[in-house]
Image: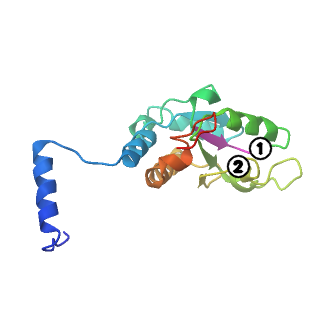
Amino acid sequence: MPQITEIDAPLAKAEEEEFERGLLLSTLDSLVNWARKSSIWPVSFGLACCAIEMMATGASRFDLARFGAEVFRGSPRQADLMIVAGRVSRKMAPVLRRIYDQMPEPKWVIAMGACASCGGIFNTYTIVQGVDEIVPVDVYVPGCPPRPEQLIHGIMLLQEKITKERPSKRGLFHFPWGSKA
């Protein structure tokens, strides 16, 4: 337990009194980040065998609802997380980018599996050697295919990243008509 110095003692006593009265003090950034990390809505973009593991993660055995990410959306306009599960062909790359562009800000990407992360065993001209060539990736989940526990761990890492970022940098105060906040 940290030691309270004489300088910090009045502040600590005031915080303790506020806590006893039932007041909770926080910043707007931390409240917005808490809400964002607790309500991640992924859009499913399953392309290969990793998609089966992604679907298993949404099943009742792994209970993805504990992390606020149980609602897999069918429309990119209702999602803020793209989970790219599997290998991405050159033909599929423009579709992936279009779906990413249709997602509202703030948005995040998880590359699930070795194929999505670096092309996997498919070192050919038809397979994109890492989805980060098309969209910015926030979390890489390794494995071939990764287990549902690994995807859950990736979501938890993304939640830590969301907690630490400033919402104003990711689009909380973004005005499409050009004014600055």
SS at mark 2 in the image: helix
Residue 100 placement, left or right of 31: right
Residue 140 location, quadrant: bottom right
Residue 163 placement, left or right of 135: left
Q: How far from the left and from the top, in percent, is residue 35?
A: 40, 39
Q: What residue is shown with label 2? A: 116
Q: Is residue 98 magenta?
A: no
The residue lying furthest to the front in this view is: 179
Q: Which residues are magenta?
A: 81-88
Residue at 70% across, 49% down:
116
Q: How are the residues colored?
A: rainbow
Q: Earlier in the sequence, mark 1 or mark 2?
A: 1
Task: Answer whether residue 155 is visible to the viewer in this image.
Answer: no
Residue at 82% across, 43% down:
89
Q: How far from the left and from the top, in percent, is residue 110?
A: 60, 47
Residue at 76% across, 52% down:
133
Magenta-colored segment: predominant secondary structure = strand
**Is residue 43 placed above or below 126 in the rendered structure?**
above
SS at mark 1 in the image: loop
Residue at 37% across, 43% down:
31
Q: Nearer the viewer, residue 141 or 19?
A: 19
> What's the residue type where badge 1 is placed?
Val
Q: What residue is shown with label 1? A: 88
Q: Nearer the viewer, residue 79 or 24?
A: 24
Q: How far from the left and from the top, in percent, is residue 14?
A: 13, 56
